[in-house]
Image: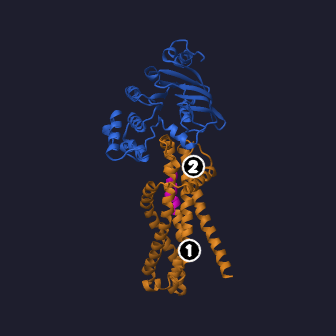
Amino acid sequence: MSSQSQGTWAPILGVWRGFFGMIWFGRLPWGETGRQFVRIVREGTGAILAGSIVQGVFVLWLAGFYSNVFGGKVWVGSVTVLAVMRELGVLMTGVLFAGRLGTAFTVEIGSMQLSEQVAALRLMGIDPVRHLGFPRVFASLVAVPLFTALSFGVAIFSSWFFMALFWDLSWPIFFQNAFAFVNPALVSNTLLRALLIGLTVSLNAVALGFFPGTGAEDLGRAATRSIVVNLFSVLLIDLGVGILTSVANQRAVS
Amino acid sequence: MISIRGLRVVFGSRVILDGVDLDIEDGLTTVILGRSGIGKSVLLKAVLGLVPLEDGSIMIDGKEILSMPPRERNAARTSIGMLLQNGGLFDSMTIYENIAFPLRHHRLAEGARLDAIVREQASLVDLTEALDLFPSSLSGGMKRRAALARCLVQNPSYMFYDEPTTGLDPATSALVEELIRKVAVERKLTTVVVSHDLDLIRFLGDRIALLESGVIAACQDRTQALSPGSPIWENFITAREKIHSGQQL
């Protein structure tokens, strides 16, 4: 694989094709996948926790402040949970994952390409995409749904905590109706979005890492391209799955 | 023996190799000479499949490898070890882990046997004391020796060296040259060295090939190549004197 820059889409399409080919033909690199999973959890948890606390405060500000002004504190919990589980939790997790780990994948593999470490793998008869790329993708597929679940918990808890702190809302009142609108369809929809985001962000990031151009400036460009492509991907997946689910729900009702 | 015929490599609109013909004979050390940027490293990488080929044929031990299925082709290519210009050591691993990596990955050895092989290779390149260090804390010469040890654990029949002494001081260069010779003799390796270091050429080269304008312009035994009047002598070895005295090459 030459490290010449090949634009944005050619490497991405090539790695997506290879990924599904490998699933089809088996022989998944489990050991390296486990190592990457541990690393992703170690490096990503801090950012997800911090982002989720901010997210909780953000939702609290929208839901708590107005319900406190206009009455209806009893519904603050359900509005918070719905906002976090339906939209913000997975979106925030996707954005943080793309920024914190997607870019790291691109730069890491890109600098290995430039310093001939990828060439060294090929000389040992090892497929670098299989060895470096796919373990990161499989680990992300597991990690992003887990990060999303963590984000839900932390955002909802932080929301209640600040609500209790500023507007004196007790635990039982907050959680009285909190999960009233949570149903299996909402959970499976969120899980689908988390899986799609994990797959897309990691595959794109890995693909762009294998074509970093020829020097530090090109590698910088590949990193920028990675974050831009992945942020758009996260937004499009969130929007696309949201629209498809709404259409399906409307058809089911009518 | 490796026979290269009509090898052509193009990067974009730039023709790097334009029909290279070269025979790499068993048991000998072939040095490929040429000016910087002429495509010497690309030639080695093309043989190893690290850069895409436009055209040509490569026979390794009588088998045309380009017509083989990818898996067989990769297996044929693992009979060739290559010391890359930067070494290509994995910077997240210690030198021990780097040397052990191909054995572990291909499950060729484990436990005490793996440890013995790693220590034997490290001792061959005189790096026993550096096994627990990371590549970032090694000098250029040590990195190349570590990378050589990692190549040798796969027991190659051919060893390619890409500018093995570039950027090294004369003493370290001499140590690397000695090591290349020692490895070639002890392991009975067929060796190819890409270089423009005249001392290395004189010390190691059994056969010397000159790469010019994308083709092998001459390939001769050392005695012939280093004789005044030979194409290699006229076009490369005395080039510095000619340029300094204002002559055209």
Q: Which mark is residue A221?
A: 2
Q: Which mark is residue B110?
A: none
First reached walking from the N terminus: tag 1 or tag 2: 1
Q: What chain is the orange one?
A: A
Q: Residue furthest top?
A: B228
Q: Is residue B142 left or right of residue A12?
A: left
Q: Residue furthest front?
A: B62
Q: Amino acid at mark 1?
A: Arg
Q: Position of residue B67 (x, y in %)?
A: 61, 38
Residue B11 visible in the current orientation? yes
Which element carries disc 1, helix, strand or loop?
Answer: helix
Residue A69 vs residue A127, the one in the foreground? A127
Q: Is residue A98 magenta?
A: yes
Magenta stretch in the rendered image: A96-106
Q: Are marks 1 and 2 on the same chain?
A: yes
Residue A199 vs residue A101, the one in the foreground? A199
Residue at 56 percent of width and 41 percent of height: A214
Which element carries disc 2, helix, strand or loop?
Answer: helix
Q: Which residue is mark 1?
A: A86
Q: Quadrant of the C terminus of chain B?
A: top right
**Chain B drawing hue:** blue
Q: Is residue A198 magenta?
A: no
**Which image quarter: residue B174?**
top left
Q: Position of residue B133 (x, y in %)?
A: 34, 43
Structural distance between the alpha carbons of marks 1 and 2: 34 Å
Q: Chain of mark 2?
A: A
Q: Amino acid at mark 2?
A: Arg
